[in-house]
Amino acid sequence: MTMPVGDRIAAAARELIGTPFRLHGRSGVTGVDCVGLALLSARAAGLDVAEPPPYRLRAGAAPVMHGWMVGAGFVPVTDRAPGDILLVRVSALQPHIVIDAPDGVIHAHAGLGRVVLMPMPGDWSELSRWRFHGVKG
């Protein structure tokens, strides 16, 4: 039986734990940022996900990220499942992308300088949540 695509995304993200943080990074060797983590995890799960449009994760980035996710075959959802990709607010002006896992969230932590698995911080608010629902996967 094939593993569900969300589980594959979460497993791929888990494989990147410890990867260095690098702004706009797209490599499991030289580093990733939060968007790169989502991109590499989706691709490793077998999805044909295009590079996102140019972005700056600052206030107002939600429409750009939403357009990228929808274009990649993801749909907005409200229930929780492994492999969901979330846009969260870490501060008033700072959105961030994380990947939901059964035991927390996986994300490219700029302060720690690497991809980590941790519980979702209580002061981060979820802005949107997407799940793959396209034809590939």
Image: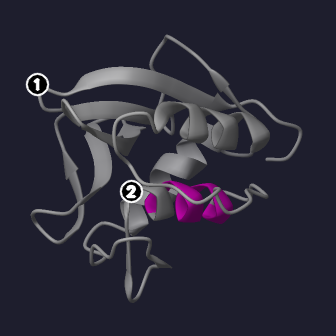
Residue 70 rendering spot, x and y as whole percentages = 72, 34
Residue 54 shows in this picture: yes
Residue 89 rendering spot, x and y as whole percentages = 27, 31
Residue 38 rendering spot, x and y as whole percentages = 51, 54
Query: Which secondary structure is most common in the magenta stretch?
Result: helix
Residue under label 2, please give it: 34
Q: How many labels does the image show?
A: 2
Residue 92 rendering spot, x and y as whole percentages = 19, 29
Which labelled disc corresponds to residue 123?
Answer: 1
Q: In the image, is residue 2 above or below residue 126?
A: below
The residue at 67%/63% (across/down) is 51
Residue 4 shows in this picture: no
Q: In the image, is residue 117 above or below residue 28?
A: above
Residue furthest to the bottom in view is 30
The residue at 19%/63% (across/down) is 110
Residue 76 on the magenta segment: no
Element on which disc 2 rests: helix
The residue at 57%/28% (across/down) is 130
Badge 1 amino acid:
Asp
Is residue 75 rendered to the left or right of residue 79? Answer: right
Residues rendered magenta in the picture? 37-44
